[in-house]
Image (cartoon, rainbow, N blue to C red):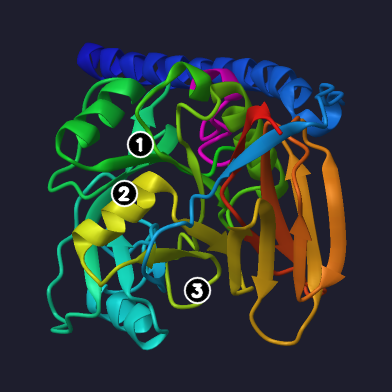
């Protein structure tokens, strides 16, 4: 009888401690969220600095590489994840039939391997969606670890990123404003600024708030500057056949291979999309966006301070930077709400003309 009471008491204490940690974590995250919202550029208007009109402007084009565009999915799950509902074979075949060239299988906290499709023009990437436990697993925020052969089950967020990079992989921040995991799934801007060596941030994930994720990424790259590259990706984070093919990236690679994909992700020669097919580039110092097809969309050119410096509803648009914008990125949105995001075109002021 005494042992039973002690066992019940221990269970009760454990439950109370867990609930206390969860409630405390929710309160802390709410406070952090209030701080983060103040950091979004659209909530803090900033004036573009003055610049001489007789200086040249150099536009750094992340798409200025040879190659063709291929469709890639960088975040999805099979039933090897606890919340996955379709088999690995069913999932892989769905992406293959949908015209994807690259597919990263990112089950929760494990690496799932599959070699059931023998096609040199379809490349499967090993990876995982890694949980950074807080206050304890399975709660906490998530990150992508791509091109890795094994999961990382210990260490803080930086340790998990660094282990991926040491293994010649790539790390990325998953759904920064995801409210899941009892709200412990969010990444705050200060947290993201404190980390290093990750390359990707999701600006679209159907389980998160894309507007906030985009704003978080924008403010992140504004603060990091051109020396530290962090690129935007869209994913579907599918767990079954009803969710797949909602978001993807179009990568510009010369040929089809795992190494070609990795190089494109590191240098930023890709764009994120939930629908539009777009060609972004630079022509004679002018940033251009051309939409494939005849359906017009709103094309917005956004400066480093968060200001939309030019917008047009058309199948193509262009903007000549003044040089004081820091960087220009482009967003495309159709009447149906389908979107595409370019990577930043960083600007450098050159010698006087």
Judge whether 348 appears above or below 248 on screen.
above
Rounded to the nearest whole Å, what is the CA distance between mark 2 and mark 3? 19 Å
Q: Is residue 227 magenta?
A: no
Task: Assess disc 3: are there few (<14), some (14-19) or many (≥20) residues with their C-alpha within 10 Å of its C-alpha.
Answer: some
- Which residue corresponds to the image point at 67% horizontal and 75% vertical from the top-left? 291
Residue designated by label 3: 245
Q: Give the range drawn in magenta.
A: 179-191
- Which residue corresponds to the image point at 56% horizontal and 49% vertical from the top-left? 343
The answer to whether residue 22 of the structure is visible from this angle is no
Q: Which of marks 1 and 3 is in front?
A: 3
Disc 1 secondary structure class: strand
Residue designated by label 1: 131
Which x, y percent locates residue 18? 44, 20
Answer whether labels 2 and 1 touch (C-beta < 8 Å): yes
Task: Assess disc 2: are there few (<14), some (14-19) or many (≥20) residues with their C-alpha within 10 Å of its C-alpha.
Answer: many
Is 281 in front, or is 180? Answer: 281
Judge whether 74 appears above or below 99 on screen.
above
């Amino acid at each position: 009888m005494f042992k039973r009471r002690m066992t019940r008491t221990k269970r009760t204490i454990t439950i109370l401690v867990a609930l206390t940690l969860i409630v405390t974590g929710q309160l802390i995250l709410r406070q952090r969220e209030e701080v983060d919202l103040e950091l979004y550029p659209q909530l803090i208007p900033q004036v573009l600095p003055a610049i001489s009109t007789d200086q040249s402007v150099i536009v750094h084009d992340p798409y200025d590489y040879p190659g063709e565009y291929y469709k890639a999915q960088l975040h999805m799950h099979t039933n090897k994840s606890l919340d996955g509902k379709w088999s690995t074979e069913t999932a892989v075949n769905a992406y293959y039939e949908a015209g994807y060239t690259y597919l990263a299988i990112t089950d929760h906290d494990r690496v799932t391997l599959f070699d059931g499709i023998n096609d040199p023009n379809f490349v499967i990437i090993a990876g995982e969606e890694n949980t950074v436990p807080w206050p304890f697993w399975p709660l906490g925020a998530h990150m992508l670890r791509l091109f890795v052969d094994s999961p990382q089950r210990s260490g803080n967020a930086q340790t998990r990123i660094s282990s991926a990079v040491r293994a010649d992989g790539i790390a990325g921040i998953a759904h920064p404003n995801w409210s899941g995991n009892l709200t412990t799934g969010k990444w705050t801007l200060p947290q993201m600024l404190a980390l290093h060596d990750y390359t990707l941030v999701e600006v679209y994930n159907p389980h998160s708030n894309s507007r906030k994720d985009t704003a978080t990424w924008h403010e992140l790259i504004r603060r990091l500057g051109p020396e530290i590259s962090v690129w935007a990706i869209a994913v579907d984070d599918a767990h079954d056949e009803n969710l797949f093919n909602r978001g993807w990236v179009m990568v510009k690679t010369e040929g089809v291979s795992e190494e070609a994909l990795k190089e494109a992700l590191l240098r930023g020669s890709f764009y994120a999309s939930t629908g539009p097919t777009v060609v972004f580039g630079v022509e004679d110092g002018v940033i251009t966006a051309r939409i494939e097809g005849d359906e017009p969309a709103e094309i917005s050119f956004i400066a480093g301070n968060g200001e939309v410096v030019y917008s047009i509803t058309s199948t193509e648009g262009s903007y000549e930077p003044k040089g004081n914008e820091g960087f220009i990125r482009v967003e495309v949105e159709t009447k149906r709400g389908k979107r595409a995001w370019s990577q930043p075109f960083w600007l450098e002021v050159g010698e006087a003309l």
